[in-house]
């Protein structure tokens, strides 16, 4: 899930000063909204503790665009910090963590003031901030800071990680007001009936479920008859069914006649938080993994026992094998935890495991907890989304070895080595560290997720050994809009290649990282680059892609080469992780989301009822006016067979294409700028006046259907024509944008002088319009599909005769315009906004501002650094399991999260779905056939068929490669005799008429087979090795 956008021009849209909005193109605005962003950008945050977790929180806050971030850490950097503190370098060891980190954090966002402080925490220091974040802080410090912050209205977030364990606490005061609990767009539905009663019952049109929940508040508009509803404030509802709900007493209201729109209203929610001292004694716990629902209460006490140990000894417990009889430090932590628990039941092994990992420092766990903690800070200052109330505990113990843990995790294996990986070695031992270094991984995409993956790979040491490597590919260049979430890039990287700069930035974090950058798109056309040798040399693939097609392609490649795949994606505050394990799990392709519901054509053309409809109509207008006609004209002028191909198109397409070409070259062709203005004015009249008048001529406002109901009712909103006014800013917006785009498509210089355009408009003559009889307007897509429009051959011949020949237009060409939402100077979004809002005015649909229009028309996928960090952290926890070779399906976790709710959930991977045939083949199975025989000759078709008969007792009835049929039982005897003794590759080359490239080591054959009983049987494909 990634894309880019642009928020230039925000000042004019929302009246927000540009200096408050951070860098342009901030996708966070699409997640939080501009009101929440304004509150964030007046907030000062203190982050105390600058180890791996603290820097993760600070990085996300700086990218998020708070007013200021102050880094507090009086301690010097040590070798152990390098395990996850990605902004410390080896030469920083001995320097102040905060001061060494500051310049690299400040580079992320010049709109956020980043400073550092080495003075001890004090009430005077804390009193200047709206939010305080404590990381890796002693409990005693947490308690006095918690007391002070709670009593002074300062929001507090406490976060800590120890190896595979994480802890998060929030205190946002006595009465926090949440303006929007989930961040979803308010729902709306069309009303078909409201009863009089106590309570009254509302029935919505059965086109779609209303989606409301009991307890929601709604308002009504456009209700006829029971008009009292239109004047009511928000009313609470109780859902009765998917299309019905009840409201308050309607018995005294007028009788319902028709119409109405019901809209959800987001109501403020008040939340009370306990101070830390009280919440320790009476905890509210958020469960993140329902398979471990019993663990949070145990961990709540175990962390307190760990803090007691830290206070008494001034150090963390030493690692010791947790499965051996409790002894040493772990035994003492357990005893201290029992004191805290006061008789409560404890999972003693879990407590000992926390003690064993107390010196551990893992970048993926810091990324996950740091992403959540930063999101909680944003909630605290913005009032947007539901905060965590109040404790969250997390563990990922499935990452530990499945077997032989006592021999793999000895005190010797886990001892510190004055290495940057000591924090990881303390958890997993030195043996796994060597395995990580030898891995060869392929990262597909260097956007937001790709940057986070490379950061984590550098920190954990993946591909950092002499035999290891990481290859990252991305064909895109860096845009300004990428900077606020693709955190490896800086302003001076704009226009450079993403993969190259991301690789260089990751290498700076860990110079040992053996990373190679590529710029080739993954797909069938690059299989000469990413060939058999490339994939067979990999240990795994990590996807960081932004489209489903590429994901499906990479999934197929991983299944074919039997490589594990880490798949992750985000959408605003939502994210997911999926891990694909060869021979153990299903693949990404095994389950897919349903296709996005398309807007019916007739709704777009004549019966819109929502701003989404008018925006899609405006996008279609853009393509149909400024791109497709120019492309068709250029093909007509350059391709002698264009007319012949066009006449073979189905239905009325030949007529539509040739009419567009004729308009572009003859009737509408401009000679100068004034002609472009005149064309834009006439087109305005055609779309917003004439076509509406024709529609109302066909279907007058009072017309009734055969069933006696009004035609213009329900989802059909009755339109009205507009009257052109050059003094109306929206009308002039449209003409200026349309005229400039029309001029661009002809290579004519346009103008931004609105006064000059308005003057030109006064001289434009618009032909009078009268509605025509006999014009057919389809009212449904079914009617449109069943209508068989006859092609007017006479009109076709007339058009062909009127077209100038290509020879008459030497050197002439047009310039098709590709829609680009991210350039506010190119008139593209100007046209979309004006065209959509004018049509919305036709149908009395509330208009959309530029921000919302861009989100919908540009199909922007909102992105936010906090979600990306958390998701990739979880993905890299799965990486630990893959590298160790875990074989229990229960060890692997799919993750789903929505930081807005907040919700974090895990599920085990699905079993491999077998194919419906007796041997129970799975998607990972195939036949392996060696094409070269021991004598050096290649297998012939006869030998191939005999091989399957002898080895698998299968009779092949059909054999194909790609779209080429190589053999079938019904093939003519002469052709069969010819092919029987030919080598398989020779048959493939002859039938496909393509030579096999030198990079091809194997071919894929598809089979249809019969078994011994002559029954048709479904079988896997064949991998036929030729080199």
Image (cartoon, rainbow, N blue to C red):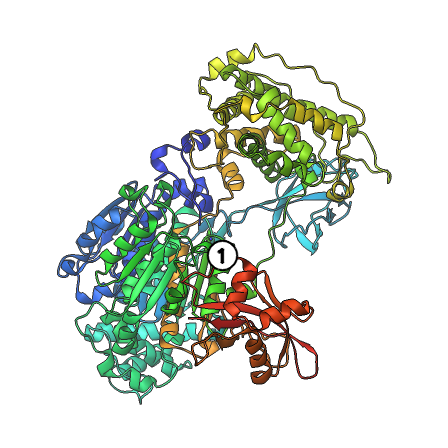
- Residue 837 at x, y = what percent? 58, 30
In what quadrant of the picture does the C terminus appear? Answer: bottom left
Residue drawn at point x = 60 percent, y = 57 percent: 594
- Residue 279 at x, y = what percent? 39, 65
Tell me which corner region of the image, top left, top right, bottom left or bottom right, holds residue 335. Answer: bottom left
Look at the image and tell me whether residue 219 can be seen: yes
Residue drawn at point x = 54 percent, y = 30 percent: 637
613 relative to 158, above or below: above
- Residue 699 at x, y = what percent? 78, 30
Image side of residue 425 versus residue 552, left or right: left
Image side of residue 626 versus residue 935, left or right: right
Q: Nearer the viewer, residue 263 or 946?
A: 946
User: What residue did someone put label 1 on?
Assistant: 901
Q: Nearer the viewer, residue 317 or 790?
A: 790
Look at the image and tell me whether residue 579 can be seen: no
437 relative to 74, above or below: below
- Residue 651 at x, y = what percent? 72, 39
- Which residue extends farthest top? 763
Tell me which corner region of the image, top left, top right, bottom left or bottom right, holds residue 460. Answer: bottom left
Q: Residues within 10 Å of mark 1 (few under 14, many from 20)?
A: some
846 relative to 78, above or below: above
Q: Nearer the viewer, residue 967 or 454?
A: 967
Image side of residue 246 versus residue 448, left or right: right
Residue drawn at point x = 31 percent, y = 86 percent: 406
Q: Secondary structure at mark 1?
A: loop
686 relative to 382, above or below: above
- Which residue extends farthest left? 94
């Amino acid at each position: 899930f990634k894309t880019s956008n642009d928020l230039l021009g925000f000042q004019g849209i929302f009246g927000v000063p540009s200096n408050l909005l951070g860098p342009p193109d901030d996708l966070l605005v699409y997640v939080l909204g501009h009101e929440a962003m304004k509150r964030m950008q007046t907030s000062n945050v203190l982050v105390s503790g600058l180890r791996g977790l603290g820097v993760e929180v600070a990085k996300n806050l700086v990218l998020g665009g708070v007013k200021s971030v102050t880094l507090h850490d009086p301690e010097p950097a040590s070798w152990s910090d390098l395990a996850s503190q990605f902004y410390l370098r080896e030469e920083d060891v001995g320097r102040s963590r905060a001061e060494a980190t500051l310049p690299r954090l400040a580079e992320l966002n010049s709109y956020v003031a980043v400073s550092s402080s080495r003075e001890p925490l004090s009430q005077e220091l804390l009193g200047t901030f709206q939010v305080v974040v404590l990381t890796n802080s002693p409990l005693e410090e947490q308690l006095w800071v918690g007391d002070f912050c709670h009593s002074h209205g300062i929001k507090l977030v406490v976060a800590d990680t120890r190896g595979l364990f994480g802890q998060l606490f929030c205190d946002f005061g006595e009465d926090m007001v949440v303006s929007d609990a989930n961040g979803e767009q308010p729902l709306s539905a069309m009303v078909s009936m409201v009863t009089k009663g106590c309570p009254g019952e509302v029935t919505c049109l059965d086109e779609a479920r209303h989606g409301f929940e009991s307890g929601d508040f709604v308002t009504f508009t456009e209700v006829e008859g029971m008009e009292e509803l239109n004047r009511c404030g928000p009313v609470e509802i109780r859902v009765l069914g998917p299309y019905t709900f009840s409201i308050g007493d309607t018995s005294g209201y007028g009788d319902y006649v028709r119409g109405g729109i019901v809209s959800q209203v987001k109501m403020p929610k008040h939340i009370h938080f306990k101070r830390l001292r009280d919440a320790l004694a009476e905890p509210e716990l958020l469960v993140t993994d329902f398979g471990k629902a019993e663990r949070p209460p145990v961990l709540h006490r175990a962390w307190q026992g760990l803090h007691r140990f830290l206070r008494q000894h001034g150090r963390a417990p030493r690692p010791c094998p947790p499965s051996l009889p409790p002894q040493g430090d772990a035994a003492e932590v357990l005893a201290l935890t029992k004191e805290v628990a006061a008789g409560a039941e404890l999972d003693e092994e879990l407590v000992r495991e926390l003690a064993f990992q107390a010196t551990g420092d893992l970048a993926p766990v810091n990324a996950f907890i740091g992403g959540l903690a930063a999101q909680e800070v944003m909630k605290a200052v913005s009032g947007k989304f539901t905060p965590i109330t109040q404790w969250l505990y997390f563990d990922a113990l499935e990452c530990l070895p499945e077997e032989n843990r006592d021999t793999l995790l000895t005190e010797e294996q886990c001892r510190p080595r004055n290495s940057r990986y000591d924090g990881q070695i303390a958890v997993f031992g030195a043996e796994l560290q060597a395995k990580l270094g030898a891995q060869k991984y392929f990262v597909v995409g260097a956007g937001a997720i790709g940057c986070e993956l490379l950061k984590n790979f550098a920190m954990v040491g993946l591909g950092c050994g002499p035999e290891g490597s990481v290859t990252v590919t991305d064909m895109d260049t860096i845009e300004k809009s990428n900077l606020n979430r693709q955190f490896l890039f800086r302003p001076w990287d704009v226009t450079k290649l993403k993969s190259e700069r991301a690789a260089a930035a990751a290498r700076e974090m860990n110079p040992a990282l053996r990373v190679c950058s590529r710029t080739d798109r993954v797909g069938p056309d690059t299989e000469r680059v990413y060939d058999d040798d490339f994939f067979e040399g990999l240990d795994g693939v990590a996807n960081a892609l932004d489209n489903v097609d590429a994901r499906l392609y990479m999934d197929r490649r991983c299944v074919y080469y039997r490589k594990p795949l880490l798949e992750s994606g985000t959408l605003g505050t939502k994210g997911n992780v999926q891990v694909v394990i060869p021979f153990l799990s299903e693949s990404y392709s095994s389950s897919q989301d349903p296709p996005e519901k398309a807007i019916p054509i007739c709704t777009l053309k004549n019966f819109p009822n929502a701003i989404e409809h008018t925006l899609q109509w405006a996008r279609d207008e853009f393509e149909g006016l400024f791109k497709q006609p120019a492309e068709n004209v250029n093909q007509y002028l350059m391709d002698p067979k264009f007319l012949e191909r066009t006449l073979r198109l189905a239905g009325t397409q030949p007529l539509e294409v040739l009419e567009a070409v004729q308009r572009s070259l003859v009737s509408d062709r401009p000679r100068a700028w004034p002609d472009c203005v005149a064309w834009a004015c006439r087109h305005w009249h055609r779309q917003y006046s004439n076509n509406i008048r024709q529609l109302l001529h066909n279907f007058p406002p009072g017309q009734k259907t055969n069933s006696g109901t009004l035609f213009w009712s329900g989802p059909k909103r009755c339109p009205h024509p507009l009257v052109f006014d050059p003094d109306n800013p929206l009308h002039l917006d449209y003409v200026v944008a349309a005229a400039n785009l029309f001029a661009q498509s002809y290579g004519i210089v346009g103008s931004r002088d609105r006064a000059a355009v308005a003057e030109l408009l006064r001289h434009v003559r618009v032909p009078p319009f009268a509605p025509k009889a006999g014009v057919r307007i389809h009212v449904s897509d079914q009617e449109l599909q069943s209508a068989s429009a006859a092609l007017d051959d006479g009109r076709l011949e007339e058009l062909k005769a009127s077209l100038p020949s290509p020879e008459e237009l030497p050197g002439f060409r047009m310039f098709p315009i590709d829609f680009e939402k991210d350039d506010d100077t190119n008139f593209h979004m100007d046209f979309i906004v004006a065209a959509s809002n004018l049509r919305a005015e036709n149908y009395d649909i509330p208009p959309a501002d530029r921000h919302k229009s861009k989100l919908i028309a540009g199909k922007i996928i909102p992105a936010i650094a906090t979600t990306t960090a958390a998701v990739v952290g979880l993905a890299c926890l799965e990486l630990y399991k893959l590298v160790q070779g875990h074989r229990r399906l229960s060890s692997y976790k799919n993750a789903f999260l929505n930081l807005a709710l907040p919700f974090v959930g895990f599920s085990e991977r699905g079993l491999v779905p077998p194919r419906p045939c007796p041997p129970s083949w799975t998607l990972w199975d195939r036949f392996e056939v060696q094409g070269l025989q021991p004598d050096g000759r290649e297998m012939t078709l006869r030998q191939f068929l005999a091989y399957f008969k002898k080895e698998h007792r299968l009779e092949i009835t059909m054999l194909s490669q790609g779209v080429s049929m190589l053999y079938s039982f019904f093939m003519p005897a002469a052709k069969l005799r010819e092919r029987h003794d030919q080598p398989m590759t020779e048959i493939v080359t002859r039938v496909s008429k393509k030579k096999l490239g030198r990079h091809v080591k194997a071919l894929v054959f598809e089979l249809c087979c019969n078994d011994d009983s002559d029954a048709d049987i479904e079988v896997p494909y064949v991998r036929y090795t030729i080199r």
